[in-house]
Amino acid sequence: MIILAPPSEGKSSKNTVNEKFIETNYIFKDRVEKILSILNKLDEKKIVSIYSTTLDKARVLHKNNLNIFDQGCSKAIERYTGVVFKNIDWDSLDLISKNYLNENLRIVSGLFGILKPDSLIPNYKLKMNVLSLTDFWKNDISNQLKNEELILDLLPATHRKVLKLEKNILSINFIINKNGKLIQSAHSGKVVKGKFIRFLAQNNVYDVKGITDFEYDGYSWNGEFFVKDL
């Protein structure tokens, strides 16, 4: 079973591994180099659009991205610091749960394609919804996943576009039922998504039946998605 999760905007700038990205054994280095080649050709107007910030900040982020092969690394699970990852709470998991996540969790990234929790990556910033990256990564990521018997898809809509698989995928959504109106959870959805991934790891879940046992903060499985009544 594979669990697909998005990266987070929030990232630690701390490098916890004494190894540069160029020294790692990451399988998609050539694809990363291709993206950097595309980035390197952009003018300043375009980089402001890509990074959605001021020109000064965009220049800093852009320079950092272009130099990632010479930068130090952290494990992906330690690099990402957003709400989902805070609620996975990697540091507090036991070794069995950590091994489960390294075996089963995959993080879908605009710059790196698909990552394991222990994949070594530098600090960076690049969203999936720029430079047609969903199309860029579609074959690579789908080929990595095509033989899986069960894929739990916890990706947001943009990241889901990178998949061209039609079978063995179960989309996991967290929905609020407000007076009969179903609303996709926002911030609270990220919290429960992290709690859900943590639950899977701690309970060694490998099938749909195990998934349905998860409950948190009023969310429970209704046969189609996790729903919370307000």
Image: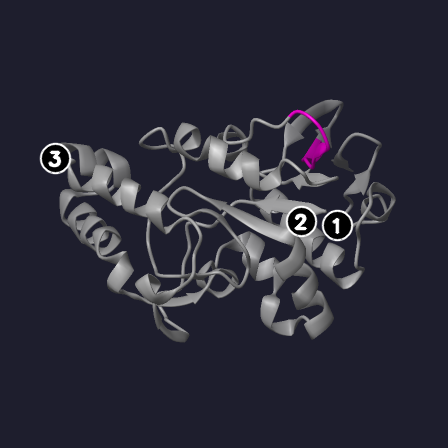
**Foreground: 46 or 150?**
150
Q: Nearer the viewer, mark 2 or mark 3?
A: 3
Q: Is residue 98 above or below residue 160?
A: below
Provide residue 171's location: percent of width, then percent of height. 68, 33
Distance from the alpha carbon under mark 2 to that under mark 3: 40 Å
Q: Position of residue 106 (x, y in %)?
A: 58, 50
For the residues bearing labels 1 and 2, Cβ distance under 8 angstroms: yes
Q: Secondary structure at mark 3?
A: loop
Which residue is pictured at 33% across the width and 49% down the height? Answer: 125
Closer to the eye: label 1 or 3:
3
Q: Residues within 10 Å of mark 2 (few under 14, many from 20)?
A: many
Query: Foreground: 8 or 73?
Result: 73
> Could you say whether the residue bearing mark 1 is in a helix, strand or loop?
loop
Q: Which residue does the numbered mark 3 point to in the structure image?
A: 43
Which residue is at 39% across, 64% downward? 24
Q: Is residue 133 left or right of residue 183?
A: left
Residue that carries the numbered disc 2 in the rendered image: 192
Any part of residue 94 in sight: no
Q: Is-magenta flag for residue 167? A: yes
Rounded to the nearest whole Å, what is the CA distance between mark 1 and mark 3?
47 Å
Of labels 1 and 3, earlier in sequence is 3
Q: Give the color scheme: rainbow, by chain, secondary structure or one colour.
A: one colour
Amino acid type, label 2: Val
Residue range (magenta): 166-176
Q: Which mark is residue 217?
A: 1
